[in-house]
Image (tube, grey):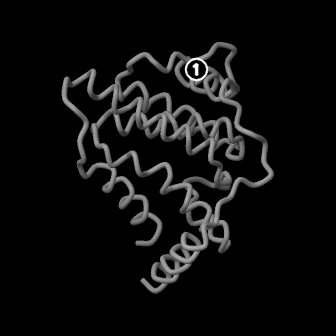
Amino acid sequence: MKLISILVAKFAFLCIVGCVSNAAHAEVNDSTVRKWITTGSLQITCGAASADADLTQSYDPEVILTNWKFLKDCRDGGMSQDLNLAAAEWYLFIRGAASSTGDTFYKQLPNWYETIKVAASAVNLSKLLETSSQPVSPADSKVTAWGNAGVEDGLRDYKKRTSQEPSLKTAAFKTGFEFIKSRFY
């Protein structure tokens, strides 16, 4: 519990001083991200496909999350630092989650996660964010922008599929809590 208090204090300090990171890593290329998303939907070997994904089409959340798992496997297989792949994976994950639930709270998560990554990196605690044996990719505003786009597209999918307006629910909070719980308890 003391570790959590220390992390929260350091995180708050970094937020107050406005710490923002976009370290010297390869720039995210939107066309390459779309190709990665297409790769996930085609279920082929890890590597960007040649065709762009049609992101305006509405997809079932299960299809989106299946494609996300494929890209997650690529990242966990040694490609975790590829920011184009990170953007595509983040887009599919958050789109699938928002599409499944229609929870508008997901709009907060991409920016929140970028801030957490920046703070963890600044105090040498990025390892706590790892979900596999691979290192966490650095915070990047374009990766976050892809996450934000995924939320919007997922909420659009939800509305089209259910004929209901997305609204504030608790699913996003639960997802975040389960992640934190898995790391500290």
Taking depth in this image into account, of 16 and 46 the one nearest to the observer is: 16
- Residue 108 in picture, x, y percent from top left: 41, 51
Q: Quadrant of the N terminus?
A: bottom left
**Relative to 65, 28 lies left or right:** right
Identify the image quadrant of the C terminus.
bottom left
Return the residue nearer the eye: 84 or 44: 84
- From the viewer's perspective, tell me whether residue 174 is left or right of residue 46: left
Q: Would you place residue 20 above or below residue 124 in this image?
A: above
Image quadrant of residue 176?
A: bottom left
Residue at 26% in and 22% down: 161
User: Does dot 1 land on a helix, a strand or a loop?
Assistant: helix
Q: Residues within 10 Å of mark 1 (few under 14, many from 20)?
A: many
Q: Position of residue 41 (x, y in %)?
A: 52, 20
Residue at horizontal 55 percent and vertical 73 percent from the top: 16
Q: Which residue is mark 1?
A: 38
Quadrant of the image occupied by residue 35: top right
Q: Residue furthest bottom?
A: 2
Give the residue furthest to the top: 51
Badge count: 1
Which residue is more in the foreground, 49 or 166?
A: 166
Position of 124 relative to 64 (above/below): below
Q: Position of residue 133 (x, y in %)?
A: 63, 55
Of residues 93 and 150, the one drawn nearer to the viewer in this rendering:
150
